[in-house]
Amino acid sequence: MNRSRDSVPLKSLKWYKDLATIKGRRKAGAFIIEGDRAIQQIIDSHPDAVIEIVSINQPLPAYRHYPVRLVTESQFRSLCSTETPQGILAVVRIPVDTYSDTLPDKPGNRVLLLEDIQDPGNVGTLIRTAAAFDYDGVILTEKCADPFSPKCVQSTAGSVLSVWLRRTKNHLKLMESLRESAYPLIATDLNGREEPSILICSHKVLLALGNEATGLSASLLKAAEHRIKIPIDRNKAESLNVAISGAILMYLSSAEE
């Protein structure tokens, strides 16, 4: 775990700024996470993922094992996406299989599938919620917001590495692989006829949530073993935000009967 503070070559400020783009992140294999609490969450779960700390002031002893780069306040602000930077950020490795088409050898029992969810705040909140309710992994389509974009990472509050992630154009292939391994595909559908209660005490589950405006594709709905909807008063609200829907359903799937 001990690392020399000289083990990371000095990089240009542009290198850090490029991590705000998906091209820059993919090239560097790294992303930025801001704020002490979020960084500590990463360190607690994946200490070896942190590459470097960038700070305005000498950081706390908790960061003593990591290379530290001190910058001016104006330089720091130029690297941050938040309106009120907290004075510290970390450069973190992106897991190598994030953009692959292969599932982990042991996917776990609960997997979330996100189809074309484009708002990074929704994607980040869903990843954070999946981690909170003991989901093991999240599959994202290529049209989803990138899970390591600044707003998405911020919305995860440090939970972005707490589940395995796959962002791929071949999500249907991964879906079929899981279904062949006895994961029932449970799809959210405004026209669904089944109650969310079927999620309670499900040993294995592949829960699919769709685009904010159009929902799930016909291909996913056709493949689903169950098509569920959350009962709401549609005279007062036409629908729920996808992140809220996901939170309700993931809670049900983790609840005991």
Image (cartoon, grey):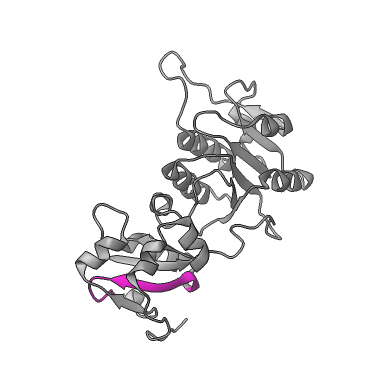
Q: Residue at x 22, y 73 (%)?
A: 57
Residue 71 locus on image (x, y percent): 25, 73
Q: Nearer the viewer, residue 52 or 162?
A: 52
> Residue 53 vs residue 247: left or right?
left
Q: Is residue 111 visible?
A: yes
- Residue 58 among magenta residues: yes
220 drawn magenta: no
- Most extreme residue toward the top is 235
Looking at the image, which residue sits at the far right?
180
Q: Is residue 240 above or below residue 92?
A: above
Q: Residue at x 54, y 40 (%)?
A: 250
Q: State the residue at coordinates (63%, 47%).
A: 110
Classify residue 11 by image quadrant: bottom left
Rendering coords of residue 12 (x, y %): 35, 73
In the rendered view, tell whether residue 204 sits above or below residue 99.
Answer: above
- Front-most of residues 21 and 217: 21
Considering only vertical position in the picture, is 79 above or below 114?
Answer: below
Instruction: Tell me where residue 191 appears, x and y as whole percent.
Output: 61, 20
Q: Residue at x 70, y 33 (%)?
A: 219
Residue 224 pos. (x, y %): 70, 33
Task: Give the extent of the magenta segment.
Answer: 48-60
User: Is residue 136 visible in this depiction of the protein?
Assistant: no
Q: Quadrant of residue 14?
A: bottom left
